Image (spheres, rainbow, N blue to C red):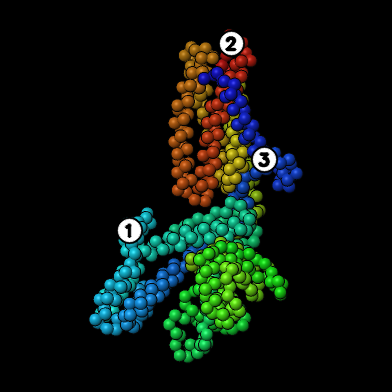
């Protein structure tokens, strides 16, 4: 156990020096690091929200909006299917949580029922929805009535998919801000937690992620105005939309969009070449470009509306077919609002409105106090452990303390290399690791003492102490490491921060406490004559 091959010695030294090298950048400011050569590591440990300060938002999705949009799509599909099958109907409308339609002719009722049952699709089972099943219940009612209602499992699946989609959309929007290590995770059934360390403008964050940014393009009714539609009746397949373009109060638009924002592949802020006003340039994918080109070819001279979050922001006239799949959105934009809209369009629309139910701002002064408190705790713990090891084990305690300092450097170096986020619970994990790091040395040194009392020579006692204590050390640390991995896997936020530093600390402490101290003792033994060696503990 005390013999080290040359390659093993080189490997241990490289690991220790690398840990020190990657930890060193954390002792300098960002400005100082910029002036250092490129070959020197520049990565520093990212500080979490509780240490650096920043914004904390808890968002809740409007699930009723998701259910309502699904009911709207069911109603539209019922209309299309019955018209295609040439089945007369009346009273097609949404009532609470279902869609109902009445068939005019009793002899067509069975055909209509069979046609509408064709809308049912089977769900794939999951851990959230359980076993698969139908997404729609189509039942018979009185007086030729047919009822269509989404199943509970299907609604749960829709909400889950919407939350997952919102998570990715919010992540893309925040990443566009250039922030580092944001925390974006689901909480409960309909909520999303967003924490952005270092963001000093929480209003900007709220404006960016709080808007749905659902974009679509719709045709304007060629002859009827919204006021005429209100006096008589809104034609089937058309809908009145409010305006935000400053030219008209409302617009009567097609219910079905020509192209939706899902077909956008890029959006960038720019300036209009004629007016020099801020605009947003957009580009469709292949299928969106084909549909948009076909509709503009067929409707030259007619206006079409650009609708954002249910409001018309522009309603230009189609002067010529737009076949290239690109265009621009103009309006009363500022440079900042055009940039924000481009980010939102690029990241995609949120599936539904998100309401801010909790908002907190952590100031950098509070973070500085937390860092100072954590540093004091770490220093006090480190000094206490160093003094204890010196008093209890003498010269071997010095070896253990050197390994302890190397362990701390390796932890900081690993956090810097992995670009992990250090939180206040993470500092607690480091402080805990300092105390746990000497456990292995205590086991080894006590074992050596027992071997010496048993009459063994110093070299045999040291070799036996290390070899026999290895199994116990591994058992203790593996079980703790498993617990840390489970905390990281199932935990969130602060718990993950604690698990990260604890996991890294376990790996580095086993390396330093067992391998590094063994190497130092081996070098110490070589510097002495073997017959004069005594165990200094």
Q: Which mark is residue 530?
A: 2
Residue beneath the point at 47% across and 24% down: 469
Residue under circle 3?
41
Q: Residues within 10 Å of mark 3 (few under 14, many from 20)?
A: some
Of the numbered discs 1 and 2, the one sitting upstream in the chain is: 1
Of marks 3 and 2, the one in the foreground: 3
Query: The residue tagged with tag 3: helix, strand or loop?
Result: loop
The CA distance from mark 1 to mark 3 is 52 Å
Residue 3 lies, in percent from the top left, at 55, 18
Q: Residues within 10 Å of mark 1 (few under 14, many from 20)?
A: few
* Circles 1 and 3 in contact, beta carbons < 8 Å: no
Residue under circle 1?
132
Of marks 1 and 2, the one in the foreground: 1
Res 67 quadrant in image: bottom left
Of the numbered discs 1 and 3, the one sitting upstream in the chain is: 3
Of marks 1 and 3, the one in the foreground: 1
Q: Which one is nearer the viewer's eye here, 433 or 289?
A: 289
Q: Which one is nearer the viewer's eye here, 294 or 229?
A: 294
Can residue 354 be seen?
no
Residue beneath the point at 55% across and 54% down: 183
Residue 103 lies, in percent from the top left, at 29, 81
Q: Is residue 310 above or below residue 407?
A: below
Q: Is residue 495 above or below residue 15?
A: below
Query: The residue tagged with tag 2: helix, strand or loop?
Result: helix
């Amino acid at each position: 156990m005390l013999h080290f091959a040359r390659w093993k010695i080189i490997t241990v030294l490289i690991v220790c020096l690398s840990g020190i090298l990657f930890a060193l950048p954390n002792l300098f400011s960002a400005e100082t690091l910029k002036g250092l050569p490129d070959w020197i590591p520049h990565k520093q440990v990212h500080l979490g929200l509780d240490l650096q300060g920043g914004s904390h938002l808890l968002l809740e999705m409007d699930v009723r909006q998701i259910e309502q949009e699904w009911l709207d799509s069911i109603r539209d599909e019922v209309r299309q299917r019955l018209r295609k099958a040439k089945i007369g109907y009346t009273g097609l409308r949404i009532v609470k949580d279902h869609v109902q339609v009445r068939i005019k002719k009793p002899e067509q009722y069975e055909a209509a029922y069979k046609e509408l049952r064709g809308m049912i699709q089977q769900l794939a089972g999951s851990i959230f929805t359980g076993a698969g099943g139908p997404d729609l219940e189509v039942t018979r009612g009185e007086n030729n009535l047919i009822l269509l209602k989404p199943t509970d499992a299907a609604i749960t699946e829709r909400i889950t998919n919407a939350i997952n989609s919102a998570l990715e959309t919010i992540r893309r929007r925040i990443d566009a801000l250039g922030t580092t290590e944001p925390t974006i995770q689901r909480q409960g059934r309909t909520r999303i937690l967003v924490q952005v360390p270092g963001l000093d403008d929480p209003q900007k964050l709220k404006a960016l992620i709080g808007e749905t940014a659902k974009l679509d393009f719709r045709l304007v009714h060629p002859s009827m105005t919204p006021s005429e539609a209100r006096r008589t009746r809104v034609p089937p397949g058309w809908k009145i939309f409010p305006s935000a373009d400053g030219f008209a109060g409302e617009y009567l638009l097609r219910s079905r969009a020509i192209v939706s924002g899902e077909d956008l592949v890029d959006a960038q802020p720019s300036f209009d070449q004629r007016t020099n006003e801020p605009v947003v340039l957009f580009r469709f994918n292949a299928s969106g470009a084909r549909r948009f080109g076909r509709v503009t070819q067929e409707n030259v001279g007619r206006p079409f509306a650009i609708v954002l979050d249910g409001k018309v922001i522009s309603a230009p006239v189609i002067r010529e077919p737009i076949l290239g799949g690109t265009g621009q959105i103009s309006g009363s934009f500022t440079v900042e609002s055009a940039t924000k809209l481009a980010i939102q369009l690029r990241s995609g629309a949120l599936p539904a409105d998100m309401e801010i139910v909790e908002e907190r701002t952590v100031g950098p002064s509070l973070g500085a106090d937390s860092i100072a408190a954590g540093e004091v705790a770490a220093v006090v713990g480190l000094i206490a452990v160093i003094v204890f090891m010196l008093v209890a084990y003498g010269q071997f305690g010095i070896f253990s303390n050197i390994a302890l300092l190397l362990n701390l450097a390796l932890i900081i170096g690993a956090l810097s290399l992995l670009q992990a986020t250090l939180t206040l619970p993470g500092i607690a994990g480091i402080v805990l690791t300092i105390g746990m790091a000497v456990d292995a040395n205590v086991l080894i040194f006590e074992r050596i003492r027992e071997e010496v009392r048993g009459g063994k020579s110093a070299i045999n006692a040291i070799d036996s102490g290390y070899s026999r204590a290895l199994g116990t050390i591994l058992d203790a640390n593996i079980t703790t490491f498993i617990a840390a991995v489970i905390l990281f896997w199932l935990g969130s936020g602060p718990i993950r921060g604690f698990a990260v530093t604890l996991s890294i600390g376990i790996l580095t402490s086993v390396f330093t406490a067992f391998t590094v101290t063994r190497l130092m003792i081996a070098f110490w033994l070589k510097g002495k004559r073997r017959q004069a060696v005594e165990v200094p503990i």
